[in-house]
Amino acid sequence: MRLARTAHTEHPWRIHEFTRDFRVEDVWSYRTPGAGPADFPTMLTAMRSRGGFGKQAPPARFLFAVRWKLGALLGWDEAAASLGERVRPLRDRLPEDLTETVDASKAGGSPFTPMYELADEAAQELANKTCHAVMHLGWVPTDDGDHELHMAVLVKPNGRLGRLYMAAIAPFRHLIVYPALTRQWERAWRERTTPHPESPAPRP
């Protein structure tokens, strides 16, 4: 379900310390019935094992395939436009208590590079010629006493190209990609089997 931007901005996440020059593009929630405050690692494991980018529904996979093809043709994803080249990685701004929580070389097939992973939030980033983007995952209590997953996408567009690109793909994100991701990730929670083998660092 799509949420107001304030669902992310009004929560005291650590990510706010490093993304003041980013804008919140989308905020989405994913239901995880019966989840408790310590179940964020379990949800991350379920997502990685059953909800990765390679296991998306056909419409979403098709859109991403088109996107990567266009990127290759137009040079959007070339090395010179990536993290560490066109933009400085946000991970370079993080204090050691955050960087030591993940291995940035293990993206697990995702185009995003891990930034950090705590007991109730995690962040990843990517950069290309259109924008520098962050995907933030947070574990939030609900009114009925459970917890649920929130995803926020934060973006710094690269000039006019980036602004036009984000506007052009908005209908596809909202009508196809995020609803497909909702079904995928909520199913991953329902079908979870084992907890995360490594607990994230406690929240400072």
Image (spheres, helix red, strand yellow):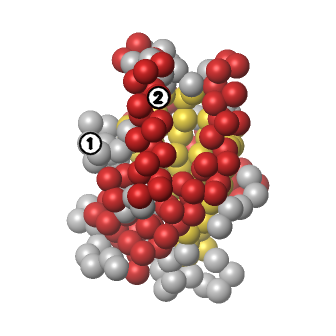
Q: Is residue 43 left or right of residue 128?
A: left
Percent across and percent down for residue 114 are: 38, 42
Kind of residue at badge 2:
Leu
120 up-or-down from 171: above or below:
below
Percent across and percent down for residue 146 are: 56, 82
Q: Is residue 121 visible?
A: no
| First in residue order: circle 2 vs circle 1 | 2
Q: Residues within 10 Å of mark 1 (few under 14, many from 20)?
A: few
Q: Is residue 62 left or right of residue 14?
A: left
Q: Secondary structure at mark 2?
A: helix
Q: Is residue 37 left or right of residue 44?
A: right
Q: CA distance from mark 2 to mark 1?
A: 26 Å
Locate residue 195: give its quadrant. Answer: bottom left
Q: Nearer the viewer, mark 2 or mark 1?
A: 2
Q: Secondary structure at mark 1?
A: loop
Q: Nearer the viewer, residue 200 or 132?
A: 132
Q: Is residue 162 visible?
A: yes
Q: Which mark is residue 70?
A: 2
Q: Which mark is residue 106?
A: 1
